[in-house]
Image (cartoon, helix red, strand yellow):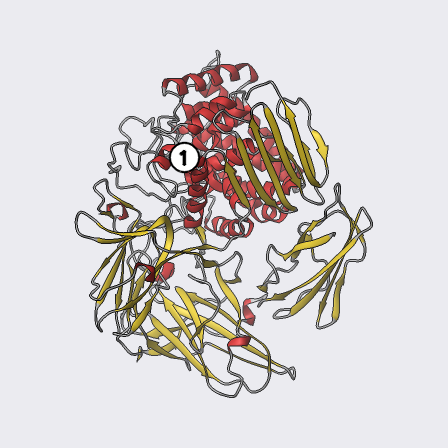
């Protein structure tokens, strides 16, 4: 049966609090038939049965990001949507949904910022309001935000299942508010409703950043909330935060993201101080833009142990970001400390030295009855916990690890015949889960957890295979452009709390690479429109750093960060000339800007930057490639960038490729690349006729390699290839995270080359299935949920029999390339099976 599935408005199902003037509608379709295409759609949108848009019968196959074109949307209004689709077989399908607008304008936030006069006390305040409803409630909403991180509860029940709201943005320019449906939580019998808003320091006021300093944005927390109740008779009652609210302290004594949380079950609520209005602009308020942070998985322990030092330790079997929920019955006043760590040292002792100034502790003080302890405003990076202070007996099953991250839709799966590669894929996924926590952080455990731009850009393509990152990066890129300046370029981190520092290549290039990647994966032209000036400003910033030739040859650069072929005297910068890398990325970013300008119809810009690009290439070749085709910086990364970014003349490519292959051979086909070379290593080899060598590099199991980390017991990606050395000792550089996603960028090659899922047109409207086999892997099964539906590639090659199964979504077309074939099979939607005997080897 022909059906419509996954009907979404701005990437979300039936959203509330949507502040988009022209929301876009997307849907997928399924059918048991082959070659199914949409021929026609009709969209009807109403508000309270009043028609606001009827698209009419549109002869179009558009089913992704179809833009609303009706009457101007009103704030705080529910809209009903009906979609009907006709396919090329004459079959019809329909579906209904709804969306609800938010404030649409900060002036509709009928509330004031409030804070508490607390004379420097650091307890976590609870702002409270009692109120009654006056009749039968049709619907009730709260719109809330904070300077800090907050949690709402109504009548003792947590409102929503979000954590760390309102999220981290460039607070002086943009602060998100959240919309909540509280209809079912209200007491509707004219009893008092108790609304609590607890606000902790969070990113706004808390201790944070490389200097572990407080008050990065302000020295007071504050709250704002607007309650709106619609009654069945059509009347409306509303109120907001003001100085009539009261303030208390409760069981959460202190909470800091770096320093953990203290919860005391023995204390009673006490008045905290006088609530007062706080002067902070409401103009910065914007609606929630991406998915919220939630508990996405709950993990039970796999074992408990006592270390050689006598520490009582629980192992959850998986490194993650989050916290531990526990049920304890201990004597009143018992202080329980839970410490968090990613690894045990080679003697089997609890290891926390890599956390630097961050404290891994949460403290719980017991009431004497059965207590449930769970932090709310802090998180840790951990696989293990060490428990101290227990008096009574306890059960390991009373402890649960709660994994937290932005609740993005899972879109990719990858498995193959090699169990260690499957573990690597899980490590990549968990690295993303742990570090896509409202922003793309570098690590979840030490005194950092910052939105490093370089890490994000090298991983963005892989990230979009594993999860739907459209909203996640849309939100973060807006902050990137807000923090960006023509004078200093793109900051190293976004949101930026490091201050004004000249930008660096590979990091600032997040401004061009990520929007372009999002456009390719999701076909979202609006992302390019929103980020175009940012992309342009980044190229202009680099241009301002050139003197004479169009080469970036000044200032600090991270270079090929933490590569193993280290620059002399450096622990962290690879041997590849940093200005070679800077000029290579200058060319690449300029090329992406040209393509973006063409798509957006900015023809003058396209021509202008095409001329700039040609000058960059000419000057790059004159500076870094000799007349006989030798690179000035003939490292693995140097060769990779010259080839992958197409910086060399055709006559020089063979020598550069030969240099790359010989360099790998000198290292017994091991990589020595860092953050900027690694993402393109296997891809460059595969696209230049050395796919089997790419496979050999990929499947290496000794140091350094991806599978070496698996063999050493990793359950997430490491920051450094040598985070744990072969002798079991840790890298002691002071910068050693065991949960860092950058080297997970190999996932892109796994999906595109091993599974063969590659786009031809943005959003996979047209795509190819073209797997490239390697020795050591006899089968691969992968899927990707594209904007049009699930794409599946499954192949096996055993005993000279090659078989392949492919799924192509409705409304798309695919090229299927069978092995050893010189031309594709062109198909429309449907399921396809191929099987044949071949005498050829991999």
Give the answer, above or below, for where 57 lies relative to 423: below
Q: Pick the residue in front: 650 or 719.
A: 719
Which residue ends up furthest to the left in the rendered image?
309
Q: Pick the residue in front: 830 or 131.
A: 830
Q: Name the residue: 50% across, 40% down.
A: 462
Q: Where is mark 1, residue-wise? A: 675
Quadrant of the rendered structure where residue 423 is?
top left
- Measured from the top left, where is residue 744 in percent x and y? 44, 38
Which residue ends up furthest to the front in the rendered image?
799
Q: Secondary structure at mark 1?
A: loop
- Measured from the top left, where is residue 831 in percent x and y? 68, 40
In the rendered image, is residue 429 in sight? yes
- Measured from the top left, where is residue 23 in percent x and y? 65, 58
Q: Is residue 281 left or right of residue 602?
A: left
Q: Name the residue: 23% across, 44% down.
A: 348
User: Dot 1: within a 10 Å radius of its alpha carbon, few (fewer than 14), some, or many (20 or more) residues?
Assistant: many
Label tally: 1
Q: Name the residue: 56% across, 45% down.
A: 533
- Measured from the top left, where is residue 811 in percent x and y? 72, 44
Q: Is residue 257 left or right of residue 181?
A: left
- Quarter occupied by the C terminus: top right
Quadrant of the rendered structure where residue 607 is?
top right
């Amino acid at each position: 049966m022909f059906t419509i599935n996954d009907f979404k408005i701005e990437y979300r199902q039936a959203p509330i609090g949507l502040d988009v003037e022209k929301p876009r509608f997307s849907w997928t379709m399924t059918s048991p038939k082959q070659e199914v295409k949409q021929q026609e759609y009709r969209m009807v949108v109403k508000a309270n049965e009043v028609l606001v848009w009827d698209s009419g019968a549109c002869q179009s196959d558009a089913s992704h990001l179809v833009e609303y074109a009706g009457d101007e949307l009103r704030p705080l209004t529910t809209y009903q949507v009906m979609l009907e689709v006709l396919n090329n077989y004459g079959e019809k399908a329909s579906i209904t949904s709804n969306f609800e607008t938010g404030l649409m304008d900060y002036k509709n936030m009928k509330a004031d910022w409030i804070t508490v006069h607390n004379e420097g006390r650091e307890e976590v305040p609870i702002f409270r309001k009692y109120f009654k409803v006056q009749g039968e409630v049709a619907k009730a909403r709260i719109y809330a935000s904070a300077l800090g991180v907050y949690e709402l509860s109504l009548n003792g029940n947590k409102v929503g299942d979000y954590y760390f709201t309102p999220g981290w943005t460039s607070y002086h320019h943009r602060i998100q508010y959240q919309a909540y449906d509280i209809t079912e939580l209200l007491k509707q019998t004219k009893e008092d409703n108790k609304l609590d808003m607890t606000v902790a320091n969070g990113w706004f006021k808390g201790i944070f950043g490389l200097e572990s300093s407080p008050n990065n944005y302000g020295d007071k927390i504050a709250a704002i909330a607007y309650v709106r109740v619609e009654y069945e008779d059509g009347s409306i009652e509303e109120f907001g935060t003001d100085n009539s609210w009261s303030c208390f302290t409760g069981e959460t004594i202190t909470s800091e993201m770096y320093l953990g949380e203290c919860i005391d079950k023995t204390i009673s609520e006490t008045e905290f101080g006088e609530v007062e209005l706080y002067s902070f602009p409401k103009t910065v308020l914007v609606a929630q833009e991406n998915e919220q942070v939630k508990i996405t998985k709950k993990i039970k322990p796999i074992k408990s142990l006592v270390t050689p030092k006598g520490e009582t330790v629980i192992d959850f079997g998986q490194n993650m970001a989050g916290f531990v929920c526990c049920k304890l019955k201990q004597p009143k006043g018992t202080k329980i400390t839970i410490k968090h760590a990613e690894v045990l040292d080679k003697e089997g002792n609890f290891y926390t030295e890599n956390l630097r100034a961050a404290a891994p502790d949460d403290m719980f003080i017991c009431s004497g009855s059965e207590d449930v302890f769970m932090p709310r405003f802090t998180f840790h990076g951990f696989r293990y916990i060490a428990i101290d202070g227990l008096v009574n007996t306890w059960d390991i099953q009373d402890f649960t690890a709660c994994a937290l991250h932005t609740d993005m839709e899972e879109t990719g799966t990858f498995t193959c015949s090699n169990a260690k590669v499957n573990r690597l894929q899980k490590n990549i996924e968990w690295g993303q889960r742990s570090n896509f926590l409202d922003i793309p952080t570098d690590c979840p455990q030490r005194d950092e957890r910052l939105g490093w731009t370089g890490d994000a850009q090298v991983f963005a393509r892989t990230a979009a295979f594993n999860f739907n990152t459209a909203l996640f990066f849309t939100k973060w890129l807006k902050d990137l452009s807000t923090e960006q300046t023509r004078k200093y370029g793109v900051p190293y981190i976004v949101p930026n709390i490091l201050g004004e520092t000249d930008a660096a290549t590979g990091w600032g290039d997040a401004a061009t690479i990520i929007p372009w990647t999002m456009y390719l994966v999701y076909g979202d032209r609006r992302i390019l429109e929103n980020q175009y000036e940012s992309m342009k400003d980044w190229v202009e910033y680099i241009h301002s750093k050139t003197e004479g030739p169009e080469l970036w040859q000044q200032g600090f650069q991270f270079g090929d960060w933490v590569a193993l072929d280290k620059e002399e005297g450096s622990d962290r910068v690879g041997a590849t000339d940093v200005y070679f890398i800077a000029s290579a990325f200058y060319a690449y970013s300029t090329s992406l800007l040209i393509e973006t300008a063409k798509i957006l119809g900015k023809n003058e810009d396209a021509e202008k930057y095409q001329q700039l690009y040609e000058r960059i290439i000419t000057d790059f070749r004159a500076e870094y490639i000799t007349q006989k085709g030798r690179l000035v910086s003939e490292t693995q990364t140097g060769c990779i960038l010259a080839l992958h970014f197409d910086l060399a003349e055709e006559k020089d490519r063979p020598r550069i490729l030969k240099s790359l292959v010989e360099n790998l051979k000198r290292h017994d086909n091991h990589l020595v690349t860092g953050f900027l070379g690694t993402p393109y290593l296997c891809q460059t080899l595969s696209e230049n006729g050395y796919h089997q060598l790419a496979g050999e590099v990929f499947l290496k199991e000794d140091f350094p390699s991806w599978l070496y980390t698996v063999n050493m017991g990793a359950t997430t990606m490491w920051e450094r290839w040598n985070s744990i050395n072969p002798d079991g000792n840790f890298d002691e550089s002071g910068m050693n995270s065991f949960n860092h996603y950058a080297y997970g960028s190999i996932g892109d090659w796994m999906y595109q080359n091993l599974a063969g899922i590659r786009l031809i047109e943005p959003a996979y409207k047209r795509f190819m299935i073209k797997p490239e086999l390697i020795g050591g892997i006899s089968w691969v099964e992968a899927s990707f949920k594209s904007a049009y539906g699930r794409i599946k590639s499954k192949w096996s090659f055993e005993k000279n029999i090659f078989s392949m199964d492919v799924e192509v979504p409705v409304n798309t077309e695919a090229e299927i390339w069978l092995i050893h074939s010189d031309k594709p099979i062109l198909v429309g939607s449907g399921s396809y099976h191929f099987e044949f005997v071949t005498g050829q080897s991999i």
